[in-house]
């Protein structure tokens, strides 16, 4: 049973890291579930303080990931279309131009979203930059938290 749980944990860790990039997969919560799954095996000797800290961090980052793009887009004068454009641009860029599409896609998507909202080119460019900055902040935080959780997972499952 421990090996089955370990295998489930590995799948969850991989999905958690993918979820840092793909907007439809909740990355940090899946990474946390991997650590929690490992806790119930003979491989994991994870303390409750670490589980609480990583669980809280995963929850906070997941919420902030929804707030940052909206907040930065509004700070730069953008609209909801810019945020949606950045998200759609990420998905399209991921499939059409990997790996560069992950960076270029959200920016182009936000720019197109703002242009369809009726903004001038200068306003749309400014809004797209704001949306892109928000996307990078959210993605960076998700990677940081999922990376730390992955570190503890690997250390407990394979190193100790």
Image (tube, helix red, strand yellow):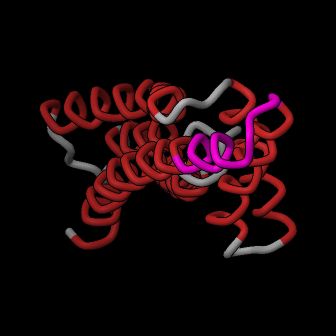
- Image height of 63 relative to 15, above or below: above
Magenta region's main secondary structure? helix
| Residue located at (28% from left, 50% from top) | 44
Q: How many marks?
A: 0
| Residue located at (68% from left, 24% from top) | 80
Image-based side of 156 in relation to 19, left or right: left
The question of residue 115 being in magenta is answered with no
The question of residue 128 being in magenta is answered with yes
Image-based side of 2 in relation to 96, left or right: left
The image quadrant of residue 32 is top left
The image quadrant of residue 43 is bottom left
Question: Which one is nearer the viewer's eye here, 69 or 153?
Answer: 69
- Image height of 74 relative to 14, above or below: above
Q: Position of residue 104 (x, y in %)?
A: 68, 65
Question: Which one is nearer the viewer's eye here, 97 or 34?
Answer: 97
* The residue stretch that appears in magenta: 117-129
The image quadrant of residue 155 is bottom left
Q: Quadrant of the C terminus?
A: bottom left
| Residue located at (48% from left, 42% from top) | 134
- Image height of 44 relative to 67, above or below: below
Q: Position of residue 148 (x, y in %)?
A: 29, 55
| Residue located at (84% from left, 64% from top) | 95
């Amino acid at each position: 049973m421990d090996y089955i749980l370990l295998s489930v944990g590995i799948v969850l860790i991989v999905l958690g890291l993918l979820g840092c990039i793909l907007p439809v997969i909740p990355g940090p919560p899946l990474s946390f579930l991997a650590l929690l799954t490992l806790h119930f095996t003979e491989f994991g000797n994870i303390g409750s303080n670490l589980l609480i800290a990583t669980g809280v961090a995963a929850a906070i980052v997941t919420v902030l990931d929804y707030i940052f793009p909206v907040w930065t887009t509004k700070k730069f004068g953008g609209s909801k279309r810019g945020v949606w454009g950045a998200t759609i641009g990420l998905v399209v860029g991921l499939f059409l131009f990997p790996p560069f599409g992950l960076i270029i896609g959200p920016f182009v998507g936000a720019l197109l979203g703002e242009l369809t909202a009726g903004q001038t080119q200068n306003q749309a460019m400014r809004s797209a930059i704001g949306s892109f900055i928000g996307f990078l902040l959210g993605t960076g935080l998700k990677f940081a938290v999922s990376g730390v959780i992955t570190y503890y997972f690997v250390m407990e499952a394979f190193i100790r």
